[in-house]
Image: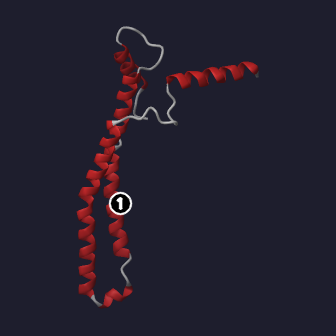
C-alpha cells in the first residue's frame, strides 16, 4: 500500500544497474522497506494526540459524584490530571519518533518469519511441483 509498482521496478532497476538480476537485490529491498517504515512515524505521532484526547475525555467523565460538593477540589484535580497528560505528550511523541528511527537503523532479514530470495524460490518450486502432481 502506498508503494506503486513502477516505483518498485525503478528502485530494483537502479540497484541492478545495467545488468539484470535474477533475484531482487538486497539494497533495493532495503530502500523500499525503509520508505515504508518512515511512513509510520506521522501516524504514530498522531495516535499519541488521539490517545491524549481520549484520556482527557476519560478523566472528565470519571470524576466521582462526591466531588460536586467540592468544586475547588474538583477543579484542582482536573488541572493536575490535565497538566500530567500535557507533560507526557511531548516525550511520548519523541519516543514514537525514536522507535521508528530504531526500526530504520536495522532491517532484520534473518528473522524466521522473513522469506528471503532462496526460500521464496524453493517455496515456488515446491508449489509448482505440487500443482504438477495434482
Q: Quick check: 67 left or right of 123? A: left
Question: Residue at 28% of width from left, 73% of height from top?
Answer: 81
Secondary structure beneath disc 1?
helix
Crowding at dot 1, Cα within 10 Å, few <14 / some 14-19 / many 20+, comes out as few
Quarter-wise, where is residue 12 in the image?
top left
| Among the 4 quarters of the image, the one containing residue 127 | top right
Front residue of 102/70: it is 102
- Report if residue 54 is visible in the image: yes
Residue 133, by quadrant, is top right
User: What residue is drawn where x is 60% and y is 25%?
Assistant: 123
Residue 29: x, y in percent? 40, 26
Residue 39 visible in the snapshot: no
Picture residue at 36% right of the left edge, 64% below the top:
54
Q: Which residue is mark 1?
A: 51
On screen, 16 above or below 5?
A: above
**Image vertical order of residue 93 relative to residue 132, above or below:** below
Nearer-the-camera pick, 100 or 82: 100
Name the quarter where the C terminus is drawn. Answer: top right
- Point out residue 119 in the picture as x, y percentages from the top left corner: 55, 25
| Farthest-out residue, right | 134
Q: Determine whether, in the image, residue 100 is placed left or right of residue 115.
A: left
* Label tally: 1
- Give the residue furthest to the top: 18
The picture places residue 66, in percent across and down from the top left corner, at 36, 89
**Quadrant in which the N terminus appears:** top left
How is this picture coloured? secondary structure
Q: Is residue 79 above or below residue 41?
A: below
Q: Which residue is drawn at the image coordinates 44% and 32% (left, top)? A: 109
Image coords of residue 56 (percent x, y):
32, 68
Amino acid at each position: 500500500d502506498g508503494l506503486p509498482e513502477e516505483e518498485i521496478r525503478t528502485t530494483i532497476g537502479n540497484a541492478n544497474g545495467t545488468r539484470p538480476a535474477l533475484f531482487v537485490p538486497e539494497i533495493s529491498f532495503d530502500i523500499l522497506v525503509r520508505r515504508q517504515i518512515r511512513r509510520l512515524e506521522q501516524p504514530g505521532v498522531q495516535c499519541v494526540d488521539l490517545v491524549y484526547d481520549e484520556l482527557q475525555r476519560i478523566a472528565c467523565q470519571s470524576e466521582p459524584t462526591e466531588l460536586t460538593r467540592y468544586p475547588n477540589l474538583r477543579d484542582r484535580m482536573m488541572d493536575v490530571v490535565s497538566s500530567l497528560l500535557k507533560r507526557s505528550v511531548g516525550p511520548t511523541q519523541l519516543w514514537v519518533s525514536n522507535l521508528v528511527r530504531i526500526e530504520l537503523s536495522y532491517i532484520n532479514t534473518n528473522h524466521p518469519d522473513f522469506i528471503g530470495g532462496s526460500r521464496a524460490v524453493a517455496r515456488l518450486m515446491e508449489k509448482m511441483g505440487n500443482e504438477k502432481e495434482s
